Every structure is written in structure tokens, then in C-alpha cells.
Image: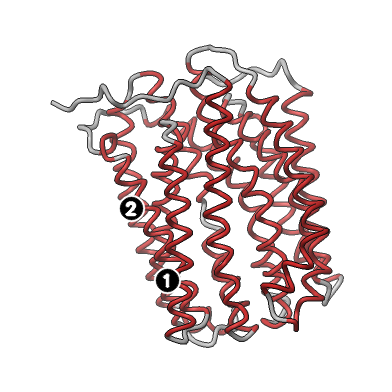
């Protein structure tokens, strides 16, 4: 007979706990992010075209539904722990674990069949980096699943350490493969595989007491009513966050894309800096909503995110050119510096919108989701149209991204403050 007495959530009532936990996740995000970013120092040791390949394949991985997966499991874990349904959660975890492997295997088969077309279309020198990316895709599916369980049970200590150790492993492995063995994009992607794989092993091990429980049957229809809005809502956010590089890659050469990848790496760090606030807030609001408790964490998170994101963007505009000169080759320093203000500016409304989305979906206010999906679809059609209308202008990508991120923030702000009386769905 399994023991579940030790499966508990952290006491979420004191604000001191929130600041301690979010502070730790910020520290871990900065440390792990810094180690991940150090990989880009290796750009000086490989051709610009190889670095562009690395950036493009990295964005392929980034376009996986990692954010929806993590938030679904964070929500379901927090809800199961609040209502005593751990065995149902165990069954769901194992089912999705198996299904993700099947989906990945089918995708790998498709890539094997069409690898020549993919290599030619993305201007890859060979298929090596593409094949290294395949196991990275699998690890990148499993990491958010179990990170979500860790987040949902509010085990933020190990969530932070998984980030730090994964980033460290990524940098050490990539540096060895590129500098010692002479691998290019393939070596950098292999480093990413080792780092993500190590993080995944940590969170899988930390949640073994949950997913190894004897499962109980769960209400599939009720689960889908909760999961589908989370998948589409957070999926729309992730699409806005990651897809611009893949669109741009189809219109620009590898040498032209290198400055864009560099600017994107620095600017996206703004979002990773403020994400921990929403990460800590989300399971606490799910827990509070399940028990009909009141919490004012949302106001604190909005204010903190706004201050950090705006100050970070201003700091990047001022210090970014210096960082670019230190890290990247002189051949694309000027182009990267020119793109930084546009990129950093586009990330600020996205960071704020992310907080509003986390609050709305944690409270099961799913009426915002169709509007978010429509906006993401509109963005997906508008961006290539703008690139066709203004050929050769990379800044057009960022201007379009910034405009749609502002619209996303506006939509979420309306559903947050303009429709306070809107009913919440039952969880």
C-alpha cells in the first residue's frame, strides 16, 4: 500500500514564502540562463552560417508545446494535491508520458523520410545537427511535463536546481564538443541535448513518488475541459514567443540570420528573468481557487514584472552593444546592435501578457483563449505577408512581433480588468 502522506504543497499563504521562492527561481534562472548563454560565446569559433543553423534548430525545439505542457501539469498537480486526487494524477502522468513518446517516434519517422528536403530548405550543411536535434526534442517534451509536476507541488528548490545544473551541463558539453573536437552546430545542439536531458532526469526523479503511485480512473471529459483551454492559451503565448526566427529563416540567408539570432538570444533573456514570478504565482492561484481562498499575489506579480521588464529592456539598450562586442564576431556586431532595441521592446508587452494569461487560466477564466488563438493565427499570416512586402528588412519581423504582443497584452488586460464580473469555469 503506497504512502502519500509526504506528498504536500508548500505553505503558500505568507507573502514571505512567495518572495523567497520567486527570488530563488530568479537566481536559478539567471545562473542557468547565463550558463546557457555562455554557449553563444562559441559563435566566435564557428562560421556565421553554422551559428544560424544552431539558432534555427534551437527555435524548432522552442516551438514544441513546452509551455502548455508544463502549465497543464502544474495546474493538474496543484489541483490534485489540493483535492486529494494524487492517484488520478499518477495515471494521467503515465498516460501522457507514453503518448508523447509515440508522437515523437512518428515525428522522427517523418523527419527520416523527408530529411533531404529539410536539409535543403533550411540550408543545413548536412543532416548531423538535425539528427542530434531528434533526441533533444524528446527530452524537451519530457522536461516540461515533469517540471510542471514539480512546479504544481511547489517544490521550487529542485525546480531551480534543475535549471542551474541543466544549463551548466549544456555549456560544458558544448564547449568540449566545439573547441576540443571541432564540431559546429551539431556540437552545440549535442550540448543542448545533454543539458536538457540532465534537467529532465532530475525532475523525473523528484516526482517519482507521484507518478509511481497505483493509478485510479480519472474523468477524461472533465480533464479535457481543463486541458484544452490551457493547451491553446499557453500555446498561443509560446507561438508568439518563438516562431519569429523560423519565419525569418525562410527569407534570409545564414549570414543574415546570425545577427538576428544573437539579438534574440539577448532579448529573450528579459522574459526568462521575469518568468519565475508567474511560475510561483500560478500553482498558488490554482490552489487558492480550488479551496475558494482569496489571494492578492497577482497585483504583486504584475507590478514586479512591469518594473523588471522595463528596467531590463532599458539596461539592454544601454549595455547590449557592449555585450554584443564581447560575445559575437565583429562581422555582425553592428547589425545585432541595430536590432536589439526592437527585439527588447517587443519582449516587454509579452512579459506582461504572460502574467495576465497565467492569472486568467489559473482561475479557469477560459473565455480569453479563443481571442488569443485568433490573434496568434493572424500573426502567423501577417508576418510572412510583411516580409514579402518589405523584402530584406529584418526589423520588420520585430516591428510586427511588437505590435502583436501589444495586442495580446490588450486582450488579456480587457479580460482581466474590463470583465471582472465574467464567470469562472469550475475546476
Mark 2 or 1, which is nearer the eye? 1
For label 1, count other residues whose C-alpha is less than 10 Å away and answer few (under 14), some (14-19) or many (20+): many
Q: Nearer the viewer, residue 239 or 306?
A: 306
Relative to 224, does residue 166 appear above or below in the rendering? Answer: below
Q: Gap in Å between the C-alphas at discs 2 and 1?
A: 17 Å
Relative to 54, does residue 348 appear above or below in the rendering? Answer: above
Relative to 223, does residue 318 appear above or below in the rendering? Answer: below
Say which residue label 2 marks: 201
Q: Nearer the viewer, residue 66 or 302?
A: 302
Colouring chosen for the image of the structure: secondary structure
Residue drawn at x 58%, y 40% is 276
Residue 371's label in the rendered image is none
**Left or right placement of residue 151 versus residue 247 in this view:** left
Name the quadrant of the N terminus: top left
Secondary structure under badge 1? helix
For label 2, count other residues whose C-alpha is less than 10 Å away and answer few (under 14), some (14-19) or many (20+): some
User: Which percent across, then down, holds residue 405?
Assistant: 76, 48
Residue drawn at x 37%, y 64% is 106
Q: Quick one: which residue is furthest to the right in this view?
A: 390
Q: Quadrant of residue 349?
A: top right
Q: Quadrant of residue 180?
A: bottom left
Can see residue 335?
yes
Count all numbered tags in the image, as a single digit: 2
**Left or right placement of residue 37 versus residue 302 in this view:** left
Secondary structure under badge 2? helix
User: Which percent across, then down, holds residue 263?
Assistant: 72, 66
User: Which percent across, then down, holds residue 338?
Assistant: 84, 69
Mark 2 vs 1: CB contact within 8 A: no
Say which residue label 1 marks: 173
Can see residue 121?
no
State which tag comes first along the sequence, 2 or 1: 1
Q: Nearer the viewer, residue 330 or 117?
A: 330
Amino acid at each position: 500500500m503506497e504512502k502519500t502522506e509526504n506528498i504536500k504543497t508548500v505553505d503558500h499563504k505568507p507573502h514571505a514564502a512567495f518572495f523567497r521562492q520567486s527570488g530563488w527561481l530568479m537566481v536559478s534562472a539567471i545562473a542557468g540562463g547565463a550558463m546557457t548563454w555562455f554557449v553563444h560565446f562559441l559563435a566566435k569559433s564557428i562560421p556565421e552560417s553554422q551559428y544560424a543553423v544552431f539558432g534555427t534548430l534551437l527555435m524548432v525545439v522552442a516551438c514544441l508545446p513546452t509551455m502548455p505542457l508544463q502549465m497543464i501539469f502544474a495546474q493538474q498537480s496543484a489541483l490534485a494535491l489540493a483535492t486529494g486526487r494524487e492517484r488520478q494524477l499518477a495515471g494521467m502522468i503515465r498516460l501522457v508520458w507514453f503518448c508523447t513518446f509515440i508522437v515523437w517516434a512518428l515525428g522522427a519517422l517523418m523527419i527520416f523520410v523527408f530529411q533531404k528536403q529539410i536539409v535543403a530548405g533550411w540550408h543545413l550543411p548536412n543532416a548531423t545537427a538535425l539528427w542530434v536535434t531528434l533526441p533533444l526534442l524528446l527530452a524537451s517534451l519530457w522536461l516540461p511535463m515533469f517540471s510542471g509536476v514539480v512546479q504544481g507541488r511547489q517544490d521550487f528548490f529542485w525546480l531551480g536546481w534543475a535549471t542551474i545544473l541543466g544549463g551548466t551541463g549544456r555549456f560544458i558539453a558544448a564547449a568540449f564538443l566545439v573547441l576540443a573536437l571541432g564540431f559546429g552546430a551539431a556540437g552545440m545542439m549535442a550540448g543542448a541535448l545533454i543539458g536538457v536531458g540532465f534537467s529532465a532526469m532530475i525532475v523525473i526523479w523528484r516526482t517519482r513518488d507521484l507518478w509511481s503511485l497505483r493509478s485510479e480512473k480519472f474523468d477524461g471529459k472533465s480533464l479535457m475541459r481543463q486541458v484544452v483551454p490551457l493547451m491553446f492559451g499557453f500555446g498561443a503565448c509560446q507561438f508568439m514567443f518563438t516562431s519569429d526566427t523560423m519565419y525569418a529563416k525562410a527569407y534570409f540567408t545564414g549570414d543574415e540570420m546570425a545577427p538576428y539570432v544573437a539579438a534574440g538570444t539577448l532579448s529573450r533573456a528579459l522574459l526568462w528573468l521575469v518568468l519565475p514570478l508567474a511560475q510561483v504565482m500560478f500553482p498558488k492561484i490554482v490552489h487558492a481557487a480550488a479551496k475558494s481562498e482569496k489571494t492578492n499575489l497577482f497585483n504583486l506579480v504584475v507590478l514586479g514584472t512591469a518594473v523588471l521588464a522595463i528596467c531590463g529592456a532599458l539596461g539592454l539598450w544601454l549595455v547590449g552593444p557592449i555585450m554584443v562586442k564581447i560575445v559575437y564576431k565583429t562581422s555582425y556586431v553592428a547589425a545585432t546592435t541595430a536590432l536589439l532595441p526592437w527585439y527588447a521592446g517587443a519582449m516587454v508587452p509579452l512579459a506582461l501578457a504572460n502574467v495576465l494569461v497565467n492569472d486568467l487560466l489559473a482561475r479557469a477564466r477560459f473565455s480569453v483563449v479563443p481571442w488569443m488563438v485568433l490573434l496568434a493565427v493572424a500573426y502567423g499570416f501577417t508576418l510572412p505577408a510583411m516580409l514579402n512586402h518589405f523584402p530584406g528588412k529584418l526589423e520588420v519581423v520585430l516591428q510586427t512581433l511588437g505590435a502583436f504582443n501589444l495586442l495580446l497584452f490588450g486582450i488579456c488586460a480587457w479580460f482581466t480588468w474590463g470583465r471582472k464580473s465574467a464567470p469562472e469555469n469550475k475546476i
